Image (spheres, rainbow, N blue to C red):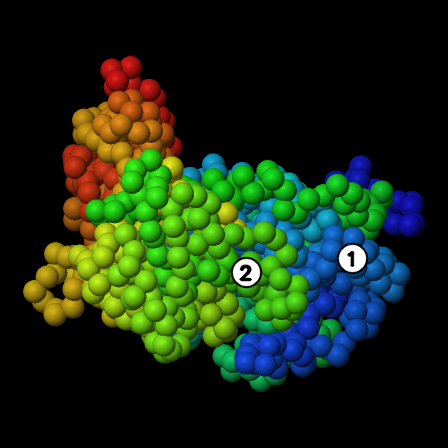
């Protein structure tokens, strides 16, 4: 390696900005453009051979594979390279093989280019490090069910440590999209329908990942989850007020409170303008208003999609100009649109200053990561690294256990191993029960990549739900009958399932999703749903089982909420598990047996009817239960946002406010007493909502403003205090300025969006106050033991 004497930007003693300026000055225009590109050298999706009964279907990506697939890494990096794409996450390989491939690709870039600037390695990490043999944590929707930012932060730190240990610099997570339509296939990748929950958990993920030295990437900026009819890549019909109040705050909070290092563009268009070509989003808001100093990376092929899909550019070169001008710094996963930037500069169609603007951001990040230090080496020393360690699995297990939601204890739960059911005859039915893949999300390596390599198995140990239940209840006689598949209309297994249920003491039916890509599943990217009925003929199977008259406990393992109204009054128990990861089957079994006291809360509502849209709780009066009678459509959910049952009981009461009047820049505290009134230790999630009694625009009738997970022993009590600043009531007014206005504010505290027994009113006084990015974005919470509680 050259010394810092002839390459002074490699001197770590110099200020970062100076090093960037020195390197930028030494670069040719071609070398600058190269820093804004990437190469996916290991991508084999275009020519993958799937089992005979399947076909690859990744359109519209297939055209992009063909466009970039023939370019070698050597040719792609002649002038340097910005990113190496998914060296670890493209095909199954051992740690030793992966380390060798990382080194090989680095050496190609370093030796083949004049300046020898290292490329940054990025990977997916939505359910853990997406590579062969790595721990698969619960999907993001399950994180939402925990309402536990500290636990999410610990998980992300573990993911980051594993990635950093094998030479990864940037992770393409978390997803900060807020659910607007449950039919969207990527609901499983979100943390739910409430902006504050998503913001708090997402910020925690960022802090955890970046604590290990791995950049977090906020995605998808912005509006992706609000596509028409929940269709992947669909256009978004959303005004700026809705965007500003419900979509952007999650990203803003992660930048303001966790210093997120990167943002990824969305595929979607907002009111006809593709996000990747929108300078208002990426420059005016993200940079100028929020002060973001990291890098913006494109979602995979979002740049050429401006030409091929959105058709706002004549060709990929024009698409590159649009994206760069808007504020996209790096094109992923391959350089296609940005390949034409140099010609555009030379022809005078593009200012070189726009190239320099993006390159400065990329180089600054490489300085901060140590890639330009004199002693940096591409060598990765991964001796002793365990990507599926016992410590990882312990975190995965805790997340899974805290995410399982008890919807209805019914007459059969818990299946206590200390009762007569210990020796009972239990029949387990349903397509989820015997397939461990159903425990994992779309971006888990076993579902994301390994379907193309069926001979490699899952790469990790994942217990199926039926085996987990056998482990949980060893004295019980447990028979499994599948009944039907997740997808399809084959009912030939119904008769055997019904006969087995009639002969059993209790039937446990596992139904729900199998995650996959682009139609190769019922949940996940490109796996959108027409409506919210259970996939395939699983609903018919449940009716057939319930018609036997035997107790049927239903366990839904899914990436989205399904409408369960037609079954709710007939079941002997109802449990919702949102894709709980490799440790999830044992967590579900523990809840069924009673070993685990369930504590998960719904991050999305459970609808009554299969066509019930929109279903989120964030509704103004005309979209809420208060509008009953003006439409024949039912708006009340079967189970509301924030709901979750338990095997113990809690009482939340005695609301006290520090004051009943504050200024438009003041704050108040709200304190409640929560007590475990049952005979088992458990967790309760105390939730604070506010409502602007009179506002200048139609506002939600309630908006979650604070929450706290509280662990209590039997009889124990605690005081939970929320510190609510007036800024937390801010909203976007008629002129699109965010304001805090005087007036009455209803304060409601309880255990779900529909169970709010504690209510009071605070008056906000003074003149209307305009607020910006420096406003208070969070509601601090303190929990103190109540010595009089037990």
Residue situated in front as seen by the camera: 116 or 594: 594
Label 2: element kind: loop
Q: Quadrant of residue 422?
A: top left
SS of the residue at dot 1? Answer: helix
Residue at the spot 79% in from the left edge and 69% down from the top edge: 73
Where's the C terminus, which quadrant?
top left
Judge left or right: residue 24 versus residue 399. Answer: right
Can you give x and y, in whole percent of width and height, for residue 719 in the image? 29, 24
Q: Earlier in the sequence, mark 2 or mark 1?
A: 1
Residue placed furthest toward the top: 787
Q: Residue at x 57, y 64 (%)?
A: 448
Viewer-nearest of discs 2 and 1? 1
Residue 686 is labelled as: none
User: Where does the image place residue 314, in percent across and percent down from the top left?
Assistant: 58, 84
Name the spot of residue 297 as percent of width and height, x first.
60, 61
Q: Which residue is mark 2?
A: 443
Q: CA distance from mark 2 to mark 1?
A: 22 Å
Residue 759 shown left or right of residue 349 in the figure = left
Q: Is residue 246 above or below residue 490?
A: above
Along the viewing direction, whichever of 98 and 227 lies nearer the viewer: 98
Relative to 352, does residue 673 appear above or below in the rendering?
A: above
Residue 380 can be seen, yes or no: yes
The residue nearer to you, when weighing 638 against 659, is 638
Near mark 2 (Cα within 10 A), the count class, few <14, some 14-19 or many ≥20, is many
Q: Residue at x 61, y 65 (%)?
A: 450
> Which residue was labeled with disc 1?
97
Label 1: few (<14), some (14–19) or many (≥20) C-alpha neighbours in 10 Å: few
The image quarter in which residue 593 lies = top left
* Picture residue at 30% right of the left edge, 37% below the top: 419
């Amino acid at each position: 390696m050259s010394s810092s004497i002839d390459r002074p930007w490699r001197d770590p003693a110099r200020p970062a900005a100076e090093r960037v300026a020195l390197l930028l000055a030494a670069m040719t225009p071609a070398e600058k453009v190269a820093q804004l590109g990437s190469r996916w050298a290991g991508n084999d999706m275009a020519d993958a051979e799937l089992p005979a009964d399947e076909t690859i279907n990744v359109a519209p990506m297939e055209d992009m594979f063909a466009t970039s697939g023939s370019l070698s890494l050597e040719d792609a990096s002649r002038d340097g390279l910005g990113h190496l794409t998914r060296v670890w996450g493209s095909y199954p390989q051992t740690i030793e093989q992966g380390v060798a491939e990382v080194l090989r690709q680095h050496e190609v870039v370093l030796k083949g280019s004049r300046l020898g600037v290292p490329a940054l390695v990025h990977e997916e990490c939505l359910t853990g490090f997406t590579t062969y043999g790595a721990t698969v944590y619960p999907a993001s929707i399950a994180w939402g069910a925990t309402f536990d930012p500290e636990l999410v932060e610990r998980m992300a730190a573990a993911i980051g440590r594993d990635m950093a240990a094998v030479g990864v610099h940037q992770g393409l997570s978390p997803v900060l999209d807020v659910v607007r339509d449950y039919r969207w296939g990527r609901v499983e990748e979100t943390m739910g329908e409430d902006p504050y929950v998503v913001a708090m958990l997402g910020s925690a993920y960022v802090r955890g990942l970046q604590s290990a030295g791995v950049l977090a990437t906020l995605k998808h900026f912005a509006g992706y989850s609000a596509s028409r009819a929940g269709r992947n890549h669909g256009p978004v019909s959303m005004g700026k007020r809705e965007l500003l109040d419900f979509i952007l705050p999650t990203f803003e909070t992660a930048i303001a409170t966790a210093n997120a290092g990167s943002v990824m563009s969305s595929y979607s268009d907002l009111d006809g303008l593709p996000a990747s070509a929108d300078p208002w989003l990426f420059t005016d808001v993200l940079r100028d208003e929020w002060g973001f100093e990291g890098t913006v990376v494109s979602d995979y092929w979002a740049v050429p999609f401006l030409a091929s899909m959105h058709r706002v550019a004549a060709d990929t070169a024009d698409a590159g100009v649009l994206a760069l001008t808007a504020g996209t710094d790096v094109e992923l996963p391959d350089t296609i649109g940005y390949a034409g930037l140099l010609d555009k500069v030379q022809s005078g169609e593009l200012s070189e200053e726009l190239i320099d603007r993006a390159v400065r951001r990329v180089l600054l990040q490489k300085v901060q990561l140590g890639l330009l230090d004199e002693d940096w080496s591409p060598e990765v020393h991964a001796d002793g690294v365990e990507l599926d360690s016992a410590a990882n699995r312990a975190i995965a297990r805790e997340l899974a256990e805290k995410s399982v939601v008890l919807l209805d204890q019914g007459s059969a739960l818990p299946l206590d191993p200390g009762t007569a059911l210990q020796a009972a005859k239990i029949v387990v039915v349903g397509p989820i029960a015997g397939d461990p893949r159903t425990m994992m999300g779309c971006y888990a390596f076993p579902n994301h990549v390994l379907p193309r390599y069926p001979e490699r198995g899952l790469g990790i140990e994942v217990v199926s739900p039926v085996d987990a239940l056998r482990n949980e209840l060893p004295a019980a006689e447990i028979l499994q009958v599948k009944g039907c598949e997740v997808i399809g209309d084959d009912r030939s297994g119904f008769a055997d399932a019904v006969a087995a249920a009639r002969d059993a003491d209790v039937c446990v039916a596992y139904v729900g999703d199998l995650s996959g890509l682009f139609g190769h599943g019922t949940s996940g990217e490109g796996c959108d749903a027409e409506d919210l009925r259970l996939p395939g003929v699983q609903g018919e199977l449940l009716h057939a089982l319930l018609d036997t008259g035997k107790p049927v406990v239903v366990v839904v393992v899914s990436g989205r909420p399904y409408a369960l109204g037609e079954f709710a009054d007939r079941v002997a128990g109802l449990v919702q598990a949102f894709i709980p990861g490799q440790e999830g089957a044992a967590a579900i079994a523990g809840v069924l047996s009673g070993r685990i006291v369930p504590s998960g809360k719904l991050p999305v509502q459970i609808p009554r009817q299969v066509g019930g849209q929109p279903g989120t709780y964030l509704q103004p009066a005309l979209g809420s239960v208060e509008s009953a009678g003006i439409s024949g459509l039912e708006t009340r959910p079967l189970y509301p946002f924030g709901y979750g049952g338990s095997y113990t009981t809690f009482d939340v009461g005695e609301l006290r406010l520090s004051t009943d009047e504050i200024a438009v820049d003041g704050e108040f505290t709200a304190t409640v007493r929560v007590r475990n009134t049952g005979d088992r230790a458990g967790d309760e999630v105390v939730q604070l909502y506010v409502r602007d009694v009179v506002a200048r625009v139609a506002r939600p009738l309630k908006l979650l403003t604070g929450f706290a997970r509280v662990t209590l022993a039997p009889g124990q009590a605690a005081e939970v205090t929320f510190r609510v600043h007036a800024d937390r009531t801010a909203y976007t007014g008629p002129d699109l300025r965010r304001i805090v206005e005087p007036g009455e504010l209803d304060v409601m505290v309880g255990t779900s969006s529909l169970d709010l027994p504690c209510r009071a009113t605070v008056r906000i006084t003074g003149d209307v106050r305009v607020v910006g990015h420096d406003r208070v974005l969070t509601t601090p919470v303190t929990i103190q033991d109540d010595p009089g509680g037990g």
